[in-house]
Amino acid sequence: MTRILLVEDDKSIVEKLSEFLSSENFSVDSASGQDEALKKLECGAYDLVLLDISLADGNGFSVCTIVKTEYGIPVIFLTASGDEYSTVTGFNVGADDYIPKPFRPRELVSRIKNVLRRSGKNGGVIDLHGIRIDTVRGTATKGGRDLCLSALEYRLLLVFLNNRGSILSRSKLLEEVWDIAGEFVSDNTLTVYIKRLRDKIEDDPQNPEIITTVRGLGYRVV
């Protein structure tokens, strides 16, 4: 069962959201502030953090930075701060998604599932063609050497891995990368990222064997 840590200081929201998510087969734990959240993260293994920006102690941006740096698990911001600055700051510190309050519970569940799928949290360690991806630590290595993937390169790799065997069109990849980046990504930019990813993971980037091109349709990881 997927374990979620809900970091929120509004008791009414905690009670209602915990009840709803439990009915959707999620295991929910809660913390009212930064200190309590960090203590629970030290002791428990969570798959995702739902995080408010305004906390009784500290703030959500600081918590997100620690979560992404030390635990490498997905973070979704739940906040009444819908201004552009808060949104951009949230993504800059590593947030996987951002949902302004009030939100529809079923939309939240859909967003949670999408983030978990994109982040590869349905697995632990994935081995593919000599590449070892640790989705808990958020690392990718080849022959024991860190591939030093950027955040978008890593997430793009996870998109391919989570759709192994399927042909992914460029429009589908653009949709996934846009969701991750929180900003517009052009078709040319996607081409650059795929090239950079191939340069790092392929033995011969000019003749790729991991991320292959399906002419006229898109890309596929076999």
Image (spheres, rainbow, N blue to C red):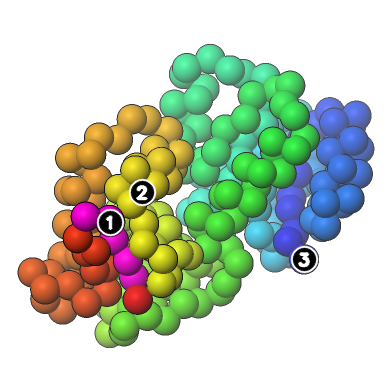
Residue 41 within the magenta-colored segment of the rendering = no
Name, please, the residue furthest toward the top.
83
Image quadrant holding the C terminus, namely bottom left
Q: Are marks 2 and 1 in contact (CB under 8 Å)?
A: yes
From which residue to which does the magenta span run?
Answer: 216-221
Residue 7: tell me if it is visible: no
Kindly report which numbered mark, 2 or 1, lies closer to the viewer in this rendering.
Answer: 1
Mark 2 and mark 3: Cα distance apart in space:
28 Å
- Kindly state the secondary structure of the residue where label 2 is placed: helix
Identify the residue at horizontal 69%, vertical 60% (top origin). Answer: 46
Above or below, 193 relative to 43:
above
Q: Which residue is mark 3?
A: 1
Q: Residue 132 vs residue 20: left or right?
A: left
Image quadrant holding the N terminus, namely bottom right
Q: Which residue is mark 2?
A: 173
Residue 209, percent from left and from top? 22, 77
Mark 2 and mark 1: Cα distance apart in space:
9 Å
Residue 220 within the magenta-colored segment of the rendering = yes
Q: Which residue is mark 1?
A: 218
Q: Looking at the picture, which amino acid does disc 2 mark?
A: Leu
Res 33 → quadrant: top right
- Kindly state the secondary structure of the residue where label 1 is placed: strand
Mark 3 and mark 1: Cα distance apart in space:
34 Å
Above or below, 52 relative to 167:
above
The numbered mark, 2 or 3, whose residue comes first in the sequence reads: 3
Q: Looking at the picture, which amino acid does disc 1 mark?
A: Gly
User: Within 10 Å of the Cα at label 2, are there few (<14), some (14-19), or many (20+) other Cα atoms?
Assistant: some
The residue nearer to you, when weighing 34 against 148, is: 148
Res 8 → quadrant: top right
Q: Looking at the picture, which amino acid does disc 3 mark?
A: Met
Kindly report which numbered mark, 2 or 3, lies closer to the viewer in this rendering.
Answer: 2
Residue 211: tell me if it is visible: yes
